[in-house]
Image: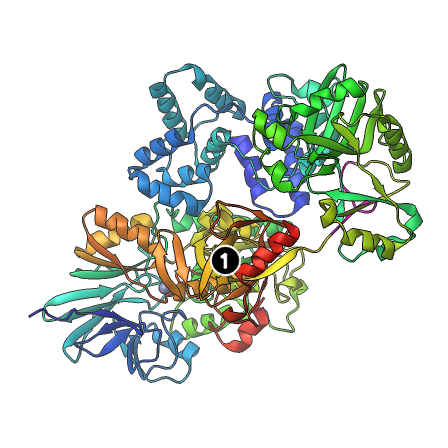
Amino acid sequence: MAREPVLTFTPSGIYCPAGDFHIDPWRRVSRALITHGHADHARPGHGRYLATEAAMPVIRHRLGDIAIDTIRYGETRQIGGATVSFHPAGHVPGSAQIRVEVGGEVWVVSGDYKTEADGLSEPFEPVRCHAFITECTFGLPVFRWTPQEEVAAAINRWWAANAAEGRASILGAYSLGKAQRVLAALDPSIGPILTHGAVEATNRVMRDQGIALPDTLHVGPDFDAKAHPGPLVVAPPSALGSAWARRFRGASTGFASGWMRLRGVRRRRAADRGFVLSDHADWDGLLGAIRATEAERIFVTHGYTDIFARYLNEAGWDAQVVTTEYSGESLDEPASDGPADDVTEGAT
Amino acid sequence: MKRFAALFQRLDETTKTSLKTAAMADYFRDAPDDDRLWTVALFSGRRPRRAVNATQLREWAAERAGIDQWLFEESYPIVGDLAETITLILPPPSAQSDLSLSHWINVLRGLHHVPLEERKARILEAWEQLETAERFLFNKLITGGFRIGVSQKLMTRALSMATGRDEAEMQHRLMGDWQPDTTSWHALIEAEDASADLSRPYPFYLAYQLDEGPDALGAPEDWRADWKWDGIRGQLILREGQHFLWSRGEELMTDRFPELARSLDFLPSGTVLDGEVLAFTEGAPLPFNALQKRIGRKTVPKKLLKEAPIILYAYDLLELEGADQRAEPYDTRRARLDELLKDLPPEAPVRLSPQLSFSDWSDLGRIREGARDAQAEGVMLKRGDSPYLAGRKKGDWWKWKLDPLTIDAVLIYAQQGHGRRANLFTDFTFAVRDGNGLTPFTKAYSGLTDEEFRQITDWVRKNTLERYGPVRQVRPEHVFEIAFEGIFESPRHKSGVALRFPRMSRWRRDKPVNEANTLDDLKEMLAAYG
Ligand SMILES: [Zn+2]
Ligand SMILES: [Zn+2]
């Protein structure tokens, strides 16, 4: 008799029949295990949630009053016939890969991940498994990241040069994860660090849970930009070019994203500078992570799935594409991301 | 190459034209002569002769990167640029080099004389010692197309800043058929005699689009009108018994339109005309479709010369008896042009584009409504006392085009864009209703806002019915208004028609699919406007 797979792919999302739960579902379900707080993975309306202790505050901040249980990294928990545990994904603080074991067979859902340690998120840990469900947002060999300290140095140089000319520098960075990673990499001796409301709201949550970030000033409605010359302003990408950003007259603008590796995307955004900084794994990172799992079966979700799956198949894996509703590294933060009052302020 | 790469980076890093111009002026002030001459050449669309073909380049890059060719080919459309794809896919360089731009150009030019294996070795060696930005530029030298957000106008301004010479003079110096091998920095930019080149054209004067109608232009008596032709803008130069035809894009088109060789039988040397190249038979222009067959052909088969013979419909006079006419008022130039062309026999390949007489703006509005019947796109308005300026300058010349034709169509296929739009679905195929089915009839890529492209991208991801390689068939749910400039018969298309300049003019969220237009509607339009 054929055994039921450990995980199946349903219209609501990734489902575990033995434990009767979903992982990062996009439709309302009774029990959801959540890899991390990004809007395409943690959605409102589920009956019960389970996430890591470190991811919980942000998820609660974003989704409000939900029934949420927490789990420590590496801790195992029995749910029905399945044993589950959460392992660092290195994507954003608190992010996890979810390991599900049923009758000795192990499947791992990667969520979003990156393999380079960023100094803020718990570093990625490969988990051995039989089947690995991996994202491949940047699953093309043209995506190769430069080390974070080089990118950080470039951002600081750009800021310092602008500050020397009396200009503000506005950097577009996704408000959960990327923004804090950038903040942690800044050199505060260059000048004041200012934040958009959507970024500051996440900062507050993370500071409360003990994550160290440099001092920042929130740019609210009555903020006097002239009183803080030569600042670096961290804002969600959608706030660049908005009325909110116009108070920094003559500012130089930049984006921090993996997409900035492509000159065409950089130019479409019409920003002055693009910094190649992603919270997803690059080509070598994806392949390294897949190899480290020692899995034979690979399911690929969001990204260049067709191409990446074909590559894996030719390289000897048993790979297939799974259609999901995850959106990868968006250059534009969805409107549902962050508290409504902050986002409307920055919406374009 | 480092100095050139630094210039490129300064240009690429800013969207502000003042900073771009300053970066170029700095470079033109102190780069070595050979490098700055080549830079002017590259930025004006010239490049060293291609030494390696694109296929070889792709194979070598994939091989060096240690990936299969198909993976390279899949990556290329997503990056959108061959030179960039190669740059990104290669492993980081293992060495450094301080050699100049001209050095690397000479390396490329030296490849013509060596066997293929040696060419490959030299290209791989270059890749190995150039860092990302330099490598990208080196590849661009081979593949061509230096589009880096620097217009000729901007470069001209930078040269003017760097040399202290007048911008219009600089613009004229850069026109024409020069190559880095046939000139020098000094001869091109600094020497006193700038008109030495027989084929050198004048910069074209370009009209602005009139969106609101002509009422704001003032008194109708001050203005002259003629048709806005749907052809190829051209400048015909007759000097010292030779003739040259330049396109607005500064392309020498003399050989493509051999009919114009006979102009010298009818007109004197020392004449330069501005006008429109049109396919023309029996006293009237043919639709653009006829001319289209001749575009892109370097030599023209006899049959086509017969089917779609061309003429130059002249509407301005830039040089007469060897003297520059551009400072004269339009009325004077036009009177001299009329005089020059008035007695030409019908077999002459040059004709006078007629002026339209009108009493007031509403009268001209009525004339404009008849533009399609005259095979024109609208009318041109030119101020009677205006000189012939260089480039696109607001004020004296306006084009008042007809409104485009439109049709409401259903989105059925979507494909990811490339380059600027690699992460969005931007290439769409549209269908009209045909009985109970849908018949595809056009593709369109532009016209939506970035925000709309993002929304439709999200929707496509969730509503894909089928995938064919990069193409996704989507649920036929959304109706878009497609605007276009012309429609003609095309047996190659399933619908039997092809459109000119189709684009998405509006997302008709208010319209259900069963209210989209039908194939019969399309055929009616073909009968009316084709
Ligand atoms: Zn994420
Ligand atoms: Zn994701």
Residue B335 among magenta residues: no
Question: What residue lies at 67% left-to-right and 55% top-to-bottom?
Answer: B404
Can residue B455 be seen? Answer: yes
Secondary structure under the numbered disc 1 in the rendered image: strand
Q: In the visual, does A269 lie left or right of A44?
A: right
Q: Is residue A139 above or below residue A59?
A: above
- Numbered range of the magenta stretch: B390-401
Q: Is residue B448 above or below residue B177?
A: below
Q: In the visual, does B452 lie left or right of A303?
A: right
Q: Residue B446's x, y, as percent?
A: 56, 54
Residue B29, by quadrant, is top right
Can residue B169 be seen? Answer: no
Q: Name the amino acid, label 1.
A: Phe
Question: Chain under label 1?
Answer: B
Question: What residue lies at 71% left-to-right and 38% top-to-bottom?
Answer: B285
Q: Which residue is mark 1?
A: B430
Q: Residue B94's x, y, as percent?
A: 35, 32
**Depth check: A230 or A107 in front?**
A107
Ligand 1 resides in the quarter of the picture at: bottom left
Q: Quadrant of the N terminus of chain A?
A: bottom left
State the residue lying farthest toward the left: A1
Q: How is the image coloured?
A: rainbow
Neighbours of disc 1 within 10 Å: few (<14), some (14-19), many (20+): many
Q: Residue B153's x, y, as percent?
A: 69, 37
Question: What residue lies at 49% left-to-right and 73% top-to-bottom?
Answer: A201
Q: Is residue B427 above or below residue B390?
A: below
